[in-house]
Amino acid sequence: MIPVHYYLILSAVMFTTGVVGVLSRRNAIIIFMCIELMLNSVNLTFVAFSSYLGNEAGQMFVFFVMAVAAAEAAVGLAIVIALFRNKQTVNINEVNILKW
Amino acid sequence: MTSELIVFIVLAAVAVLSGILMITRTNPVNSALYLILNFISLAGIYLTLHAQFVAIIQILVYAGAIMVLVLFVIMLLNLQDEVKLSEELTRRHYASLLFALLVLAMLIETIGWMGGDTLNRMQQQSPLAVTNGTVERIGDVLFTSYVFPFELTSILLLAAMLGAVVIAKKRFP
């Protein structure tokens, strides 16, 4: 059998990959996809604990996380479209109206 | 080395490699395709955990709906010239790598700290895991214990739908 550590470490590595992407990339859509990657690594932790503890609450959480991720995808992509319409770019270095 | 472990290692390697390829591609379409590969291998990992419902939903909602939406937006915006901002390695990249490694060290430290008794009791999956992941069981729990959050989710999705339409509309009122 596979100990639960393996799943947790895989989840940590995937989360770190997402963090590197968010911090280093400048394309808004790629940053958005990295956030999806981080949400998925958290889902993996939920499902692993759910399965090893024999409790289905973790899988319920994953269900709701996915609903929130779908909502986030719709709103986030709408923001990207509005951004592109106004500035003709999705490079976040050029989007600094709210930066002080 | 059992067959379960081999399946897990192959799926985990695909997931990690496609994640790394995802953040290093300069073309957003390639990134999105690698992310889909990552989601599919993650669905396989959910199957090794006996979470069938979550695995199917992962493919349908993530690899299907959300990533098609992302690809659609990438194609719609025609980001061909984004390739040229393909970012030679700067100090920012090294700094972000350093901070991310700190995050990784913290997460691994947390896993090790939790170790000992808690994890030793979790050497193998609970016998309940086989029945907990089925659609029947999930539906049973979802519509009894979690029916209120489930109904709230519908309001969330409605709000997100309205918000997306209003934000992406041509003119703000």
Image (spheres, coloured by chain):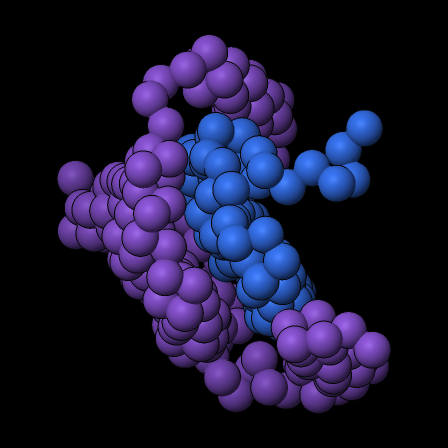
Chain colours: A blue, B purple
Q: Which of B167 and A52 is in front in this view?
A: B167
Does residue B50 appear to the left or right of A60 in the view shown? Answer: left
Does residue A100 appear to the left or right of B15 in the view shown? Answer: right
Return the x and y of residue B121 as percentages of the image width and height. 54, 40
Q: Which of A77 and B156 is in front in this view?
A: A77
Does residue A22 appear to the left or right of A2 in the view shown? Answer: right
- Residue plotted at (78% across, 40% down): A98
The quadrant of the rendering that contains the C terminus of chain B is bottom right
**Displayed quadrant of residue A67:** bottom right
- Residue plotted at (51% across, 49% down): A89
Return the x and y of residue B161 as percentages of the image width and height. 68, 80
**Displayed quadrant of residue B130:** bottom left
The quadrant of the rendering that contains the N terminus of chain B is top left
Does residue B145 appear to the left or right of B107 in the view shown? Answer: right
Q: Is residue B62 visible?
A: no
- Residue plotted at (55% across, 58% down): A84
Count of marks overlaid on the render: 0
Return the x and y of residue B67 as percentages of the image width and height. 41, 67
From the viewer's perspective, is residue B30 above or below residue B104?
below
Return the x and y of residue A46 as percentages of the image width and height. 57, 54
Q: Is residue A93 visible?
A: yes
From the viewer's perspective, is residue A40 above or below residue B162?
above
From the viewer's perspective, is residue B92 above or below residue A63?
above
